[in-house]
Structure formats: structure tokens, C-alpha cells
């Protein structure tokens, strides 16, 4: 979830980002698997910090996808999980983090991920929690309208985890060229020749 935008700066203590957070309030929650910039230590995690503070999210812990899925970088080193199970040797069991999120928190994540505008789509995914079994979650996948093109553009090679090394060169939304939608930027990226410097590996 590398997202179309960047989360606003948190109102609380910046040191709070690596602390354990109490469970979300007793509202019904959805398990969300994050694999990109929403993870701890990445630029959009501050949105989850805001949701921790309001009781709309809590960290469940490290998780890995049960199935092998492609994780690639698109324009500006934005990460995309592709809903192409068993896509071949270039797919991996992707490592990330699981969070319990309320309906209000989920709406905030949907907004960040551009669900309404077709940037990402929220789909079911099975994940294995660290120290536990397989559970059902949701994740923000690259939209089906461009996922296959992005897989071809990546040379059908993905990575098992969006690390700081893989993310090197990530460009925040405010620093990207203006005057084009994110979908236009994705289309331009997918139609350009593969560039080894853009390869996630």
C-alpha cells in the first residue's frame, strides 16, 4: 500500500510510532494486511498512528501472505501487491503487518489508497500471523485495470518484502509532477520500457 497520497503528519508524539498500542475500541474491526508505506517506519504509517490515538486501529503483529503473490514497485517506487496468485517464480509469500481497524478507520484507509478513484482495490487475502495460524484479512491491491500490465512491466519479478532498500527513491505525492492523475502516471509507467533501476529486486 504505497498509496496515491501521503498521510498527514500525526498530532501526537513522533516517538509513538514504534510503541505497542492498545487494542482498538470494542467496535467491530477488520483485519488489514499492510505491505508498503503504511508499515511502521514508512511515510504513511502516521495515518495508522492517528487511528491508534482515536481507538480506530491497533497493531496485531507481523504477518505473511499464505499464497505467493507478486509485490512490485510502480512509478515513484510506490509498492503494489498484485492479485495474481501463483504468478510464477517472481511471486513470493509477502511479508507485512496486520492491523485491526474499525469501519471509521477503514474509510480513512480507503481514502488514502484511492479506492473510489480506481488506484487500489480492497480485496480479501489470507495471511499467516506470526506465532499463529492463517486468518482472513483484506489488503489494498493494485486495481485490476492495470495489474497485469504492471506485472509485465516489472519483468514478472517481485520482492518478498517492501524494505527501505526496495523503497529507495520513493517520491512523496507532494513532490511528484503535477498536472497528471495517479492513474495517468501508472499508465505512462506501464507503457515505458523496463528499466533495471525501476526493478524492485
Image: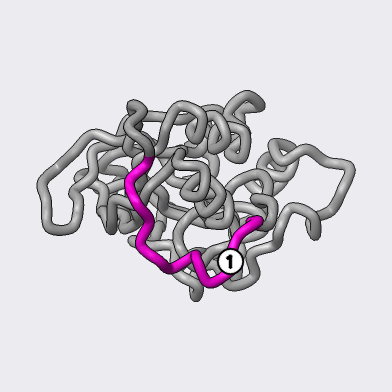
The reply, left or right, for residue 28 in relation to residue 52 is left
The reply, left or right, for residue 35 in relation to residue 12 is left
Q: Residue at x 73, y 44 (%)?
A: 185
The reply, left or right, for residue 170 in relation to residue 66 is right
- Examine the image and state in which quarter residue 100 appears: top left
Magenta stretch: helix, strand or loop mostly? loop
The reply, left or right, for residue 129 in relation to residue 47 is left
Q: Is residue 114 visible?
A: yes
List the single residue furthest toward the bottom: 165
Query: Front-most of 9 and 144?
Result: 9
Q: Is the residue 71 above or below the residue 13 in the image?
A: above
Query: Front-most of 89 and 56?
Result: 56
Q: Name the image quarter holding the C terminus.
A: bottom left
Residue 191 included in the magenta stretch of the image:
no
Q: Residue at x 49, y 65 (%)?
A: 17
Q: Secondary structure at mark 1?
A: loop
Q: Residue at x 19, y 38 (%)?
A: 135
- Rendering coords of residue 16 (x, y %): 50, 66
- Rendering coords of residue 53 (x, y %): 51, 49
Q: Is residue 146 visible?
A: no
List the single residue furthest toward the right: 179
Q: Which residue is mark 1?
A: 13
Q: Which residues are magenta?
A: 10-24
Amino acid at each position: 500500500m504505497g498509496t496515491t497520497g501521503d498521510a498527514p503528519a500525526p498530532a501526537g508524539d513522533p516517538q509513538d510510532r514504534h510503541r505497542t498500542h492498545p487494542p482498538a475500541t470494542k467496535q467491530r474491526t477488520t483485519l488489514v494486511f499492510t505491505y508498503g508505506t503504511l508499515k511502521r517506519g514508512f511515510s504513511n504509517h502516521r495515518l495508522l498512528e492517528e487511528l491508534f490515538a482515536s481507538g480506530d486501529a491497533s497493531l496485531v503483529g507481523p504477518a505473511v501472505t499464505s499464497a505467493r503473490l507478486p509485490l512490485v514497485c510502480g512509478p515513484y517506487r510506490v509498492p503494489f501487491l498484485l492479485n495474481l496468485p501463483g504468478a510464477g517464480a517472481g511471486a513470493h509469500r509477502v511479508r507485512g503487518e496486520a492491523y485491526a481497524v474499525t469501519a471509521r478507520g477503514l474509510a480513512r484507509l480507503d481514502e488514502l489508497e484511492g479506492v473510489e478513484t480506481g488506484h487500489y482495490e480492497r480485496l480479501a487475502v489470507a495471511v499467516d500471523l506470526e506465532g499463529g495460524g492463517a486468518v482472513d484479512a483484506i489488503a489494498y491491491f493494485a486495481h485490476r485495470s492495470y495489474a497485469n500490465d504492471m506485472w509485465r512491466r516489472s519483468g514478472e519479478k517481485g520482492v518478498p518484502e517492501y524494505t527501505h532498500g526496495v523503497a529507495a527513491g520513493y517520491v512523496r505525492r507532494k513532490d511528484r509532477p503535477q498536472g497528471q492523475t495517479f492513474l495517468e502516471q501508472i499508465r505512462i509507467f506501464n507503457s515505458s520500457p523496463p528499466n533495471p533501476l525501476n526493478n524492485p529486486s
